[in-house]
Amino acid sequence: MADSYDILAISGSLRAGSFNTHLLRAVASRAPEALRLDIITPRGVPLYDGDVEERDGIPPIVEELKERVRAADALVIATPEYNFSVPGVLKNMIDWLSRGEHQPFNGKHVGIMGASTGPIGTARSQYHLRMTLQSLYAVVMPRPEIFVTKARDKFASDGTLTDEATEKIIATWLKHFEPWARLGQQHGRV
Amino acid sequence: MADSYDILAISGSLRAGSFNTHLLRAVASRAPEALRLDIITPRGVPLYDGDVEERDGIPPIVEELKERVRAADALVIATPEYNFSVPGVLKNMIDWLSRGEHQPFNGKHVGIMGASTGPIGTARSQYHLRMTLQSLYAVVMPRPEIFVTKARDKFASDGTLTDEATEKIIATWLKHFEPWARLGQQHGRV
Amino acid sequence: MADSYDILAISGSLRAGSFNTHLLRAVASRAPEALRLDIITPRGVPLYDGDVEERDGIPPIVEELKERVRAADALVIATPEYNFSVPGVLKNMIDWLSRGEHQPFNGKHVGIMGASTGPIGTARSQYHLRMTLQSLYAVVMPRPEIFVTKARDKFASDGTLTDEATEKIIATWLKHFEPWARLGQQHGRV
Amino acid sequence: MADSYDILAISGSLRAGSFNTHLLRAVASRAPEALRLDIITPRGVPLYDGDVEERDGIPPIVEELKERVRAADALVIATPEYNFSVPGVLKNMIDWLSRGEHQPFNGKHVGIMGASTGPIGTARSQYHLRMTLQSLYAVVMPRPEIFVTKARDKFASDGTLTDEATEKIIATWLKHFEPWARLGQQHGRV
């Protein structure tokens, strides 16, 4: 059993001040030593076009991201909710990652969460994302769930989490996610 | 009551030989005279980035598409299914269309369909798309549904529909969609 | 155009003190004169069993409920959320109503809502219910949605609504639902 | 590591000639020696009523079923699809099983499948069922999925599976499910 786990954390927004990126930073800074989170965004991933794939193959940035997903011991994805579903920008990144050989999500253990400025906290988006991850043979931690509502009230202008209730939710979530990441190493191809 | 209806038909794929574009052409060529379908794709719509929107506003291509959606008497959307959900490319287009003033989908009557090479025919994608359209106050025709499965066997290499069963399904669908488009004109803002 | 509309309102719970029944009463008492709500529950509807249906036909209570759904100008359904979906008790009632000739939901205009003691207010359940109603050719009002969260804090012990924010949400909802019910009369069979 | 696994298999229909029960029997008879399937149905589970629960507690039949779920090494659920979702009868059984102490689905590894006489093979129902199982902290095998379409053509009148393609799908599914059941024993409380 490994002593530590490399977790790739994907924030589903391109905004520099994204609440979902803030949320992942809050999780990373509170994670136990054994969990090392590396945060990325869909920045630089082009729009998926089957004709381009056929002509030019998979873009280097996508190959590189696929390799990072494959190399990770587990994943965390923080998704915004746009129009009751996963942002096109995040879905497009996953669509590219699912192309070609060596499906990187296969058997991977994943935790998901999300933050929004509204009252639902990305619940709708997260259930759609779960279906997409299921299609890729990923195994998503069932619960606890993290729905950060009214995010404007919970993060300082520099992105620091300031809400105590959310701190507690993150602490509980981490207690479940650490064994989940550990189990993920034992899965291999499901 | 209008004598004819201008229908904006959105194909959710960038591929030139997209089965969903083929499907919309098959529908357009079989539609009664009163329904005029104009087919577009997400070609040219950039990836949504909130920082870009804040700095530069809504891109001209998006403003133009918003105007076309608004001007249409009704919409048809043909969606592929990528990883059990709406393609990022199509979702990203809708995400942009939902930005700014004058929500173009509001109260709009919509019909949806989809084609895939697999056995489910985009059912999963269509239910996610329905949720997104609901969020935008669109009113989606409940049934009949069109799930074109094993699309490779149903279209000729030039994109012509060659499957008789699908022809019948389209004919039935059009019988329902014509009054649905007509009702849409009476809705206004729901 | 009718001067008034008979609305059948279904509460998806058997509990006498159900928050969803309370919610429907709150809506009924605030509805404009033109909307007359009649509230029912799944009480008395047996568990669906295909063998029983084959042997004995559709139970009299189901036939009677089908007739009431058919006779209504529009429907309202208030659903609890059990285990992230529609309560079995409510789904079972709909399953029975969908059996036999003369599908009563066909083309019917419907509004849905829900109340729960948790933070999500039955959102998950409502999206599943929307899919079931779509399958029955019903046309569900897209928005506004009503998710009554933390219901214990919002109703008095006698079931009276005491929360001002919820009152406003109901008022807005009724402004949209009245024209929705009116349009429903023009739909007929979709 | 155990040498064999006791699998509780739930068929979501009350019909004696249910295709979902037939499907589970086909799976049971083809399972490797290490997997012993015991098939049950919702027969005898009353409609959930919160007032009855408060007054009388959890019915003995539900307590007994909870104990069987808890004792199982893993679960299989075969669900019909009624009106685009989980049958009320099956959902009602799960609703009862989720009541009281000692949540029996917690951390349990589950495989799901379904058979229908239509062309979709219960896909819609299975995705709703996955959400309900997620809510109960169960861990559902992501893939492969089993959607038995046009079931009337695939089972003999005595319920025996006669379709070769479905046989192969079951064989593949069992190859994935055996390690899934084994992993389930290592999960404990997630």
Image (tube, coloured by chain):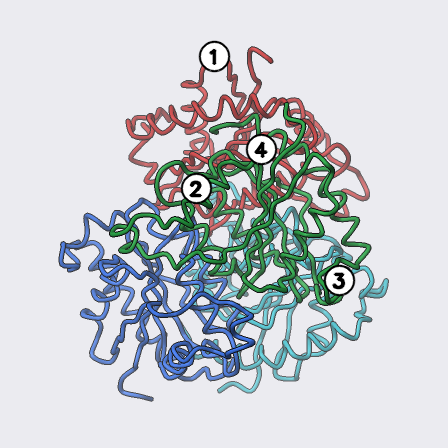
Chain colours: A cyan, B red, C green, D blue
Nearest the eye: A39 or B8 = B8
- Residue at the extreme bottom of the image, as rendered: D1
Is the residue marked by circle 2 packed among few (<14), some (14-19), or many (20+) residues within 10 Å?
Answer: few
* Marked residue nearer the N-terminal end (1 or 4): 1
- Mark 3–mark 4 Cα distance, whole angstroms, equals 49 Å
Q: Which residue: 52% across, 20% down?
A: B37
- Mark 1–mark 3 Cα distance, whole angstroms, equals 54 Å
| Three-letter code, disc 1 | Glu
Report whether mark 2 lies on the same chain as mark 3. Answer: no
User: Is D29 positioned to the left or the right of A24 in the image?
Assistant: left
Disc 1 is placed on an element classified as loop
Q: Which residue: 59% across, 47% down?
A: C9
Nearest the eye: B152 or D151 = D151
Residue C43 in percent (x, y) is at 49, 58
| Three-letter code, disc 2 | Glu
Residue B112 in percent (x, y) is at 49, 34
Residue A78 in percent (x, y) is at 64, 62
* Residue tagged 4: B43
Residue C17 in percent (x, y) is at 63, 64
Report whether mark 1 lies on the same chain as mark 3. Answer: no
* Total numbered badges shown on the rendered structure: 4
